[in-house]
Image (spheres, grey):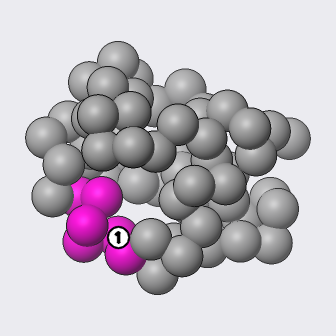
Amino acid sequence: MASLDTLPKIGAPATRALHDAGYTALRDLAGVRRAELAALHGVGPKALRILQEALTEHGLTLA
């Protein structure tokens, strides 16, 4: 199970984009709009799927 304190392995560009936008932990993404994340350079459909799956493990979701 993914930890809410760390981001799952989604690739370096997507991880950098999330960090640059202020998202440093999985818990930071709960309730964030998919479109907002998809607009970040480096965050594509695969990264969004992995993030959603990790959130789902904790009963959370993207908006």
Figure quadrant of the N terminus: top right
The crowd level at tag 1 (other Cα within 10 Å; few <14, some 14-19, many 20+) is: some
**In the image, is 4 to the left or to the right of 41?**
right
The residue at the point 44 percent across, 71 percent down is 32
Position in image of residue 58 (x %, y %): 82, 62
Q: Is residue 47 left or right of residue 5?
A: left
Identify the residue at image location x=15%, y=58%: 39
User: Is there any visible trace of residue 14 in the rendered image?
Assistant: no
Q: Can I make out residue 57 in this image?
A: yes
Residue pictured at 60% horizontal, 33% vertical: 8
30 versus 10 height, above or below: below
Residue 36: where, in percent of width, then height? 25, 67
Residues in magenta? Answer: 33-38
- Dividing the picture into quadrants, the one containing residue 28 is bottom right
Identify residue for label 1.
34
Amino acid type, callout 1: Arg
Measuring from the top left, give residue 13's x and y in whole percent. 26, 24
- Magenta-drawn stretch, dominant element (helix, strand or loop): helix
